[in-house]
Image (cartoon, grey):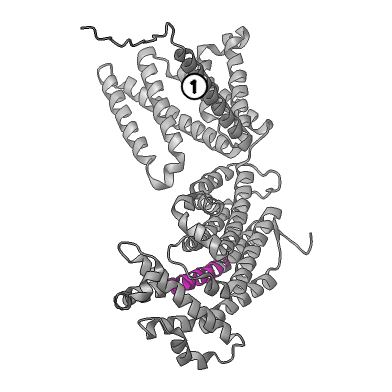
Amino acid sequence: MNKKMGSIEINIPTSTPTKPELHETATKFGVNKIWLQIQSVWELCKEDTGREIFALKVGVTVLLVSLFVLFEAPYQIFGSNIIWAILTAILVFEDTVGATFNRGFNRAVGTLVAVILAIVVAETALSCGYLAEPIIIGLSMFMIAVITSYMKMWAPLVQYEYGFRVTLLTYCLIVVSDYRIGNPIRTVIDRLYTIGIGGMISVFVNVSIFPIWAGDQLHKELVKNFHSVADSLEECAKKYLEDASEKSKITMTSIEAFHDEPAYKRCQSTLDSVSRFEALAKSAKWEPPHGRFMHISYPWLQYVKVGAVLRHCAYEVMALHSIVHAKIQVPYKLRVGLQSEVQEASNQAAELVRILGRDISCMQWSLKDSHIKRLHNSIKRLQSSMCFQYSYMLASTFESPIPHNPSKSFANISHIFYHFPYQREMEEEIECYHEIKGKQLRRLYSWPPREADAFEEDSEQNIKMSNKVRGLETTAILSLTNFASSLMEFVARVDHLVEAVDELSKMAKFKSALLC
């Protein structure tokens, strides 16, 4: 037992130095998180200053109404019922002047209707005796609740929903207070003057301090949508005609980057503006003549119609955007054959849309015949190029099941295109097209995946895959046709947009650009 036992030294630290480090890291993480939240709030404030103005005006309104309670002299005159003025000011105040007028009107009319009904029912119930009075009051409250709740859901009266809600609330308060206190006239008077005070202060503050007009916002947002659609159209055409290397990057990252592109976001904001436009138009109808909109009956609803036609144009831009990000694409050498025609047509269409937006922004009417004529001529050239330069691609694809000798297929129909000076270049492009697409599509449908060169030695498998390759090649060719046809459809819808803007200029009495 003379064995030597090896000794093992174990060092146990007396303190835990990691805990302060963890605490320090957690503190830094918390500080960074708070700082990021502050930055996000600051960015939100810089994005739209109207929010800050609206919040400050609400604070000023509540402060002014509360003075009737905080000071002794007005409180002795109005009494505790002045609290309804504060409630009215908070409920009536909206971000735009038109919405505030609309709310105030609904509250005033709803209160008047409730007052009249309450007085009639209260006097009737009082005359029917002590036993019948609670029964009549209870049934009347039930009937008023049913009628107002049903009518506010009726489509033509949805915009007066707040008025029906005020009618029900005011009626119940007056009738119940009359049954317990026995002085309905006093309750009615207190209710009316408190609502009047709160409503007038809200309207005064909203109109006098940095007023936000719903008509101005509707006008600016419609012009902004015009420029957004024009910019998105040009961006889609530019990306579709990009170089093959750049195009492959777009296609590979299409799913991840589809919703983050500026063109998509601008079009999506245009498509989502329908409810915003309708709300602003309804609020603008309540606003008095102001600024540049001095007509008594300004055609605000026509702005909504113009926005609807513009959204139909945005639908086609979204279609172009989806074609740009499609997985099956025509090779760059064939796509670039329509580069000048596509660029000219897209630029002319975008320029015309911008001109329409500038006319609305400046409230003027200008002659657009020359722009429309140039746009139609560019579309005719695009149609001619599609018909005479690329129809042979479909014919050659359907004619030969295995596109290994595309020059023979092209020679069978080359007499149709004898008048083109660049026929030899087109032959080289079609050969390159079949060579590239044949390799790519055969590799796409192979399992396990193999290199494209491996298929050159496997002729039997090439024959089996010929039908799939031919169908996918046809689909790739048709993607170019889809892009051109969507661009033509956009131009057709721009014609309707021109008509809608002209109608707006007549109804709003825009000045002629020749006289400006």
User: Of residues 234 and 85, which is closer to you in this image?
Assistant: 234
Q: Quick check: 83 above or below 294?
A: above
Q: Is residue 419 left or right of residue 446?
A: right
- Looking at the picture, which amino acid does disc 1 mark? Arg
Q: Is residue 170 visible?
A: yes
Seen at 24% across and 9% down, the residue is 3
Q: Is mark 1 on a helix, strand or loop?
A: helix
Q: Is residue 260 left or right of residue 474?
A: right
Figure quadrant of residue 399: bottom left
Figure quadrant of residue 133: top left
Figure quadrant of residue 65: top right
Q: Mark 1 points at which residue?
A: 191
User: Of residues 400 and 127, which is closer to you in this image?
Assistant: 400
Q: Quick check: 470 above or below 235?
A: below
Q: Can residue 203 be seen in this view?
A: no
Given the current orientation, which residue lies at the most extreme bottom position? Answer: 415
User: Of residues 41 and 323, which is closer to you in this image?
Assistant: 323
Q: Quick check: 26 above or below 392?
A: above
Residue 134 locus on image (x, y percent): 28, 20
User: Of residues 120 and 232, which is closer to you in this image?
Assistant: 232
Seen at 59% across and 26% down, the residue is 58
Which residues are the magenta region?
475-494
Residue 67 locus on image (x, y percent): 61, 14
Residue 187 locus on image (x, y percent): 46, 18
